[in-house]
Image (cartoon, rainbow, N blue to C red):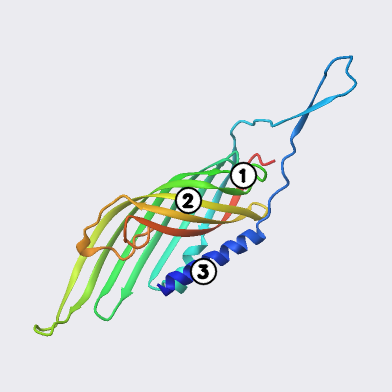
């Protein structure tokens, strides 16, 4: 519990830092169209119109989840990596593919636990910002899949009436699916370089045998309950196309 509290304190501090250093670009100027009201009118009328642009590729970006490195402090038994590929369409829609790898090596007095595997998430984000379209404030969804295996060794069972026994659980392989909803922000700190933060709601779509539940599922986290909360912190570089 103490580790979880520290991790969420770290989340709040990081979000505050992002909000402080993120800066927007100059808002796009609206075009004014002058209308002729006839030869007998002395005044001229100006009407502002928003120019609707067709959807176009604005950039392809690559990101690294720097929040994963907090595992070295808060969860030293776990090592994980995650990267992302985003396709920016008109600064409104983002096609997203995220992938990563995770391993857990947990050693306790009465058992040892080992798991490893990879995960892939695919989905889309929608930008709700209009004034600063190159930055991001919006929502998204993902479908996630993890392929992993786990095992337990040196399981010690002590008894007052029977002799102490040891056992183990052989390697079990699993395919795990979940649905994910996110709300996040992303700000440009240098040209084409962004920092992003997002809060996640993960919904379990796969049941696993309760006799040997996984300690940590790659990309999803601890297997406990149907709904799980999480956070991500990404540093992102965008290769620009058609940027105004």
Residue depicted at 19% across the width and 66% down the height = 170
Residue depicted at 82% across the width and 25% down the height = 45
Q: Secondary structure at mark 2?
A: strand
Left or right, 46 with reference to 93: right
Res 57 quadrant in image:
top right
Which residue is disc 3 drawn over?
Answer: 9
Q: Quadrant of the C terminus?
A: top right
Q: CA distance from mark 1 to mark 2?
A: 16 Å
Determine whether 155 is above or below 34 in the image.
Answer: below
Q: CA distance from mark 1 to mark 3?
A: 27 Å
Q: Secondary structure at mark 1?
A: loop
Left or right, 94 with reference to 214: right
Q: CA distance from mark 2 to mark 3?
A: 19 Å
Q: Can you give x and y, in whole percent of width and height, for residue 210 in the image?
A: 22, 61
Q: Secondary structure at mark 3?
A: helix
Q: Can you give x and y, in whole percent of width and height, for residue 220 in the image?
A: 38, 57
Left or right, 242 with reference to 120: right
N-terminal label among 2 and 3: 3
Q: Kindly tell me whether residue 72 is visible in this rendering.
A: no
Residue depicted at 58% across the width and 33% down the height = 55
Residue 129's label in the rendered image is 1
N-terminal label among 1 and 3: 3
Q: Quadrant of the N terminus?
A: bottom left
How packed is label 2: few (under 14 Cα within 10 Å), some, or many (20 or more)? many
How packed is label 1: few (under 14 Cα within 10 Å), some, or many (20 or more)? some
How packed is label 3: few (under 14 Cα within 10 Å), some, or many (20 or more)? few
Res 103 quadrant in image:
bottom left
Q: Kindly tell me whether residue 108 is visible in this rendering.
A: yes
Which residue is disc 2 drawn over?
Answer: 182
Q: List the single residue furthest toward the top.
A: 39
């Amino acid at each position: 519990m103490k580790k979880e509290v520290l991790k969420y304190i770290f989340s709040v501090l990081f979000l505050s830092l992002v909000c402080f250093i993120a800066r927007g670009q100059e808002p796009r100027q609206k075009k004014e169209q002058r209308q002729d009201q006839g030869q007998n009118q002395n005044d001229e009328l100006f009407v502002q119109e928003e120019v609707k642009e067709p959807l176009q590729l604005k950039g392809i970006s690559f990101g690294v989840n720097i929040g994963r490195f907090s595992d070295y402090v808060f969860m030293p038994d776990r090592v994980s990596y995650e990267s992302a590929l985003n396709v920016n369409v008109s600064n409104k829609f983002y096609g997203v593919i995220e992938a990563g790898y995770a391993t857990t090596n947990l050693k306790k007095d009465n058992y040892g636990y080992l798991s490893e595997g990879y995960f892939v998430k695919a989905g889309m984000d929608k930008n709700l910002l209009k004034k600063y379209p190159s930055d991001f404030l919006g929502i998204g969804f993902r479908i996630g899949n993890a392929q992993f295996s786990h095992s337990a060794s040196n399981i010690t069972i002590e008894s007052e009436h029977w002799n102490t026994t040891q056992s183990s659980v052989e390697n079990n392989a699993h395919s795990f699916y979940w649905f994910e909803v996110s709300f996040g922000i992303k700000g440009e700190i240098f040209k084409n370089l962004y920092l992003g933060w997002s809060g996640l709601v993960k919904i379990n779509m796969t049941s696993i045998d309760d006799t040997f539940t996984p300690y940590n599922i790659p990309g999803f986290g601890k297997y406990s309950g149907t709904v799980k909360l999480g956070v991500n912190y990404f540093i992102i570089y965008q290769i620009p196309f058609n940027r105004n």
